C-alpha cells in the first residue's frame, strides 16, 4: 500500500472518531450485537477499568456487511475503508500461503480454510488520554482468538505491549508499518508450530492513541483443528478439532484471560 493512501486512511479514522455524538448514535451497537460504535468503559471489581472506545464491523466476505451500518459510514471514509479491507485481505492470504510453505503444509489445506469466505472483522480503537493511567487498562492482556491480525497504529503513540519471557515489552510504532499478530486459530491449525502472541494496550496520560486491527479467521462451516499433514509429521495432534461455530460459541462465553482459551483446546 502506498504511503499516501495510508496517510489518508489514518486521517479519516481520526475524523471518524471526532464525529458529533448525534452522528455516532446512528452507528451505535444494537442490542445483542457487537458491531458498531461502542465502548469498554466498564468497571470490574476483579480488574482495572477498560479505557477505550471502539468501532467494530465485519468487512469480509462482503455479503456479511451489515446493511444498517456500512452504507451509513460517511464518505470518503467508507470507500477508503473498503479499499483498505481488500488490501489487507490480500496481504493476509499471501502471508498465510508463505507460512504454510515454510511448514511444508499441503497447499490446499491452508487454502480451503482461508478461501474467499475468509472472515475479516475490523476493529478501530480510540484510547483517550487518562489522568491516572495506572488505574486503567486500554485493552486487557489476551491473545487474538482468530487466525492472523494486521494492525495499523494510526497516530504513532506508544501503547501496544507484547509479553515475552514473562515481561511486557513495548512495541515502538513505525510510520505506516503494518504489524502482524498470530492468533490462537493459527496456532491450533499449525499444531503449535506458530504460536499466538499475548498482548495488551496501555494508555497515555497526555495523548490519545488510535489503532485499527483487521482480524482474519476461517469462514463459517469450516473446522478449527490441526491440519492433517502436520499431525502425520508430528505423530500427534496437540489440539482438538471443532467446528468454527462451536469454537466461537464456547469462546464468547468466557472472558479474555491471556492465552487461557488455548488450554481449553489442548488435548
Image: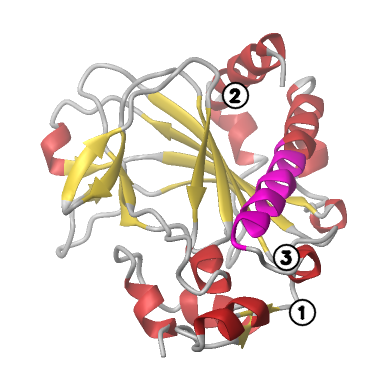
Q: Are marks 3 and 1 in contact (CB under 8 Å)?
A: no
**Which residues lie in the magenta part?**
88-103
The reply, left or right, for residue 185 in relation to residue 76 is: left
Q: Quadrant of residue 220?
A: bottom right
- Observer-side mark, 1 or 2, equals 1
Label 1 belongs to which residue?
221
Alpha-carbon span between mark 3 and mark 2: 32 Å
Of residue 146 and residue 212, the one placed in the foreground of this image is: 146
Residue 110's disc is 3
Residue 58 in sight in this render: no
The reply, left or right, for residue 81 in relation to residue 155 is: right
Is 114 magenta? The answer is: no
Q: Which of the image's four quarters has the C terminus?
A: bottom left
Q: Quadrant of residue 141?
A: bottom left
Alpha-carbon span between mark 1 and mark 2: 33 Å
Q: Position of residue 196 (x, y in %)?
A: 42, 59
Residue 129 in sight in this render: yes
Identify the image's colour scheme: rainbow, by chain, secondary structure or one colour. Answer: secondary structure
| Upstream in sequence: badge 1 or badge 2 | 2
Amino acid at each position: 500500500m502506498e504511503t499516501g493512501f495510508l496517510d489518508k486512511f489514518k486521517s479519516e479514522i481520526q475524523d471518524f472518531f471526532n464525529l458529533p455524538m448525534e452522528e455516532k448514535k446512528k452507528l451505535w451497537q444494537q442490542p445483542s450485537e457487537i458491531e458498531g460504535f461502542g465502548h469498554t468503559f466498564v468497571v470490574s471489581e476483579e480488574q482495572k477499568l477498560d479505557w477505550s472506545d471502539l468501532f467494530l464491523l465485519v468487512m469480509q466476505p462482503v455479503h456479511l456487511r451489515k446493511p444498517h451500518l456500512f452504507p451509513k459510514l460517511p464518505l470518503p471514509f467508507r470507500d477508503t475503508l473498503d479499499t483498505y479491507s481488500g488490501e489487507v485481505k490480500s496481504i493476509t492470504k499471501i502471508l498465510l500461503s508463505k507460512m504454510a510453505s515454510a511448514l511444508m503444509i499441503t497447499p490446499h489445506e491452508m487454502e480451503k480454510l482461508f478461501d474467499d469466505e475468509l472472515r475479516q472483522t475490523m476493529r478501530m480503537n480510540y484510547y483517550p488520554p487518562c489522568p491516572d493511567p495506572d488505574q486503567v487498562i486500554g485493552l486487557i492482556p489476551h491473545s487474538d482468538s482468530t487466525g492472523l491480525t494486521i494492525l495499523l497504529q494510526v497516530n504513532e503513540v506508544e501503547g501496544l505491549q507484547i509479553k515475552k519471557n514473562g515481561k511486557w515489552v513495548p512495541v515502538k510504532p513505525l510510520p505506516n508499518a503494518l504489524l502482524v499478530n498470530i492468533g490462537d486459530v493459527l496456532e491450533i491449525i499449525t499444531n503449535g508450530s506458530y504460536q499466538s502472541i499475548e498482548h495488551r494496550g496501555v494508555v497515555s496520560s497526555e495523548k490519545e492513541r488510535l489503532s485499527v486491527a483487521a482480524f482474519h479467521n476461517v469462514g463459517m462451516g469450516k473446522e478449527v483443528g490441526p491440519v492433517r499433514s502436520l499431525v502425520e509429521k508430528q505423530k500427534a495432534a496437540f489440539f482438538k478439532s471443532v467446528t468454527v461455530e462451536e469454537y466461537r460459541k464456547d469462546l464468547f462465553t468466557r472472558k479474555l484471560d491471556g492465552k487461557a482459551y488455548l488450554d481449553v483446546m489442548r488435548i
